[in-house]
Every structure is written in C-alpha cells, then in structure tokens.
Amino acid sequence: MPKQTGSTEKALIEQVQKKISAAAAEDATQEIPETKPFEGHSYIKKTWTDTEEGVERVLLNVALGHMNRPPNWEKTEVYEMMPEWGTLPLQRGWVIRIPTHFEGEEKYLLHYFFVSHYKDGTECISQNYTELISPRFIQFVDHSGLYTHVKLHWSLDNWAYPQNTELEFEGIEWGSEYSVSRSPYRQGDRLYERGRAGIIMKAPTPRIFRGIIWGPHKEKVDYCFNLITIDQTGKLVSKWDNNEGLNYKLTI
C-alpha cells in the first residue's frame, strides 16, 4: 500500500509549493520589460562642411554613454555622411536616431567625431564632441473641448528634420487600452477612437494633453500642433495650430 502523508507533512509540502509558485511568479514579473511613457526615438541632424579639396567621404562615429563616465568607443555606430549637392563649399549630412532613454536613464551623453577620407588614401580625425541629451515636457491646453488627439510637430535646428510626437490626455493612463501608446497600430480604428473620445469628452474643460521630447541640452526647438477631433460619422478631422504661421519656440 502507498504510504499515507500526515497532516504535518502535507502542510510543509503546501508551504514549499507556495514558495516555489511565488518565486516563479516573481521571476516571470522580472522578465517583463518595463514600459516607460513616451519611450521612442528622436532625430538629430549632424552636418559636416568640406574645408579642403580631395575629400572622398566622411564618416560619422557615434557612441552613447552615461553622465560622468567616459565614452565606450567599443560600441560605436558608424555612418557615411551624405553629400548635399549644390552647396558650396560642399556640405554633408546625416540624421541620427537617438533613444528617449539610454539603459533606463532619461539624461545621457551623445559622443561623436568625424573621420575624413581623402582621395589620396589619407584620413583626418576630428576632435571628439559631447552633447547632453535631456527631456523636455510639453503641454497643450484644449479650451474648446473638441480634440481627441494632439500631435506635436517639431524639429531641431530650424526645421532640419521635422518629426511628430503624440501627446497624451491627462485623464488616460499611459499604456492603457485607449492610450496613445496604442495609436501606432490602432489610430483610425473606430472602436479605439470612440472609446478614447468617450473618456476625453467626459472630462471638464480645459483639457490638458502632455508629452515629452528629447534633444541636446539648450537646443532650440520649433514646433506647432496638429489637432484631431472625431465627427459624428466617426471620421477623424484635423487642423493646425501654428501660432498664425509663426510657429512656437522653446529651448530644451
């Protein structure tokens, strides 16, 4: 006959099983990557001007790093800068896509330098440059109570490379079903748009939309707003707020 387990042994087994289950649940939780609000990318354009003749190509070398630490050039990304034909002297440019967070930090350093390759086989390395990448909070106040989406249309360096960042309504939790974090693959979906509009329209006016952009510290930003509402047929309708053609400005 199989051996019967006593009540004391059963209790001990149950305790062990609970500990194992709790440990497994903790491990599973730790494996889920953390989602940060407005996590994505920003775009920075870097330019180079040929000051000498005979330059065949210019390489941009980029590395990201933590504050108060030296750059780790072993993790360098290298890009060949594109000639901008028609400029004199010849200018070359490349747009860098930088993250909004670097290894969990909102502020980090962008290190870069240039290498010029000449037609005679020689090369010249520039000095190292370092920029502090920082976040900047943006908000739009909707006094009319009409809008369900507010997109920030912005750029560094006098509209060198425009990009869009969607702002989140203050009453919707980031990552929830009707958050703009779902917009990349649900915007225009009628169920999503009506559900989002239903939440927003219940809120009192004025209504606040907030977002964050990232860029070099003290860099000037030009921006305007793309405002989107939903009509009675469920169609999205947009308009622009560009400060009557003058656009808005801020400093990161």
Image (spheres, rainbow, N blue to C red):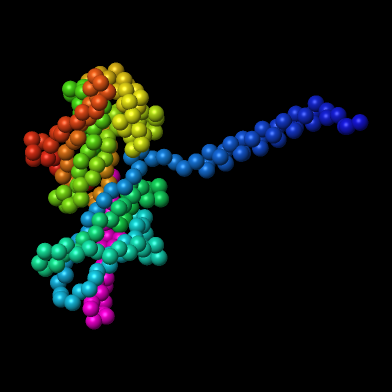
Look at the image and give the residue range highlighted in magenta.
111-135
Residue 172: % across, % down? 34, 27
Residue 174: x percent and y percent?
36, 33
Residue extending farthest bottom = 120
Please state which of residues 59 and 35 is positioned toward the viewer in this rendering. Answer: 59
- Kindly identify the residue that appears in the image at 27 percent across and 35 percent down: 167
Q: Does the magenta run of residues contain 7?
A: no
Asked if residue 134 lies in the magenta stretch, the reply is yes
For residue 183, side relative to residue 118 (left or right): right
Return the residue nearer the eye: 93 or 18: 93
Dominant SS of magenta comes to strand
Residue 160's spot in the image, x, y percent? 17, 52
Q: Is residue 1 visible?
A: yes
Task: Using the image, determine if residue 216 lies above or below residue 181.
Answer: below
Left or right side of 163 for 1: right
| Among the 4 quarters of the image, the one containing residue 4 | top right
Question: In the rendered image, is residue 68 in sight?
Answer: no
